[in-house]
Image (cartoon, grey):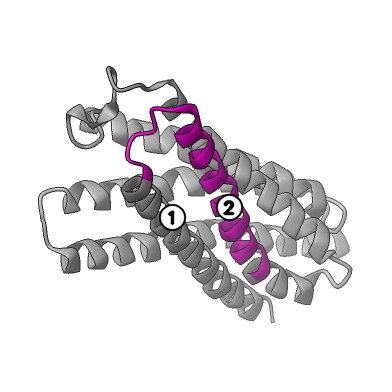
Amino acid sequence: MKSTFQSSWIINDAVGIFLGIAVAAGLLSYESQLLGQPDTALEKAAGLVFAIVGGLIAGSILAWFQWRILKQRYQHLSWVKWWGNTVLAFIAGWVLAIAPSFTFTGENSMQAIPPFGIPEFTVVYGSIIFGAILGALIGFAQWLVLRNHQDKAAPWIGMNVFSWALSLFVITLAGLVFQASNSFREFLLTGVAGGIIAGLCIAGITSYFFRQADSNNTSATA
């Protein structure tokens, strides 16, 4: 039963993360084509709207895939609270991600040097840092709900910090690999592979939380 739950969690969480990442990538690509580097206040406001909508959609997708499995373990887990906290964390993360672009103008645009005018090592390190921040936001927001159903739930935050940092690092590496190719097929395959690996990383690492919780419950009843 325990291993079945963990397997179901890994599959559903990975799918939810992959689909959420796909939505994020699609919206970012559309925003980039539509707005380019935002210079005016209106363009920056539009970028903010994209961030909020992207966080709402990606957060909702992940929250649903997670909640439908968690409900099997925690029967009184509220969908509204789990969804709301997850979505707010995603929106906060998306807004933080685009915040630096609000400071750019035509004179200091990031488009001068690919990728986006940032050295590759900075992109890689930045992805790890942002992944850790996003993981902390998601982990903390969900912990606020999870702590009411599971004793010693604090490790949930740390596992999300580590797993999201690792996953965004993987996605960034995949993007840098694509950078040398102009083929849309290679871009699509690289993106899909990166998203799948990232989803499995997060799902696999967070699944350990439930194994640890089961171990603690067993020790308490022994």
Pointer 2 and pointer 1: residues touching (CB < 8 Å)? yes
Compared to residue 44, the image places residue 82 above or below, namely: below
Q: Is residue 82 visible?
A: yes
Bounds of the magenta segment: 35-64
Image coordinates of residue 184 in percent, x first then y, are 18, 64
Q: Residue furthest top?
A: 107
On screen, residue 56 versus residue 219, left or right, reads: left
Which residue: 43% across, 28% down? 40
Sequence-wise, which precedes: disc 2 or disc 1?
1
Image coordinates of residue 129 in percent, x first then y, are 45, 32
Identify the residue position indicated by label 1 in the image.
27
Q: Quadrant of the C terminus?
A: bottom right
Q: Is residue 216 visible?
A: no
Residue 11 vs residue 81, the one in the foreground: 81
Residue 216 vs residue 171, the one in the foreground: 171
Which residue: 77% across, 77% down? 72
Compared to residue 202, the image places residue 179 above or below, namely: above
On screen, residue 132 versus residue 214, left or right, reads: left
Compared to residue 108, the image places residue 214 above or below, namely: below
Image coordinates of residue 209 in percent, x first then y, are 65, 57
Query: Magenta region's main secondary structure?
Result: helix
Q: Amino acid at mark 2?
A: Val
Q: Residues within 10 Å of mark 1 (few under 14, many from 20)?
A: some
Identify the residue position indicated by label 2 in the image.
53
Q: Amino acid at mark 1?
A: Leu
Q: Secondary structure at mark 1?
A: helix
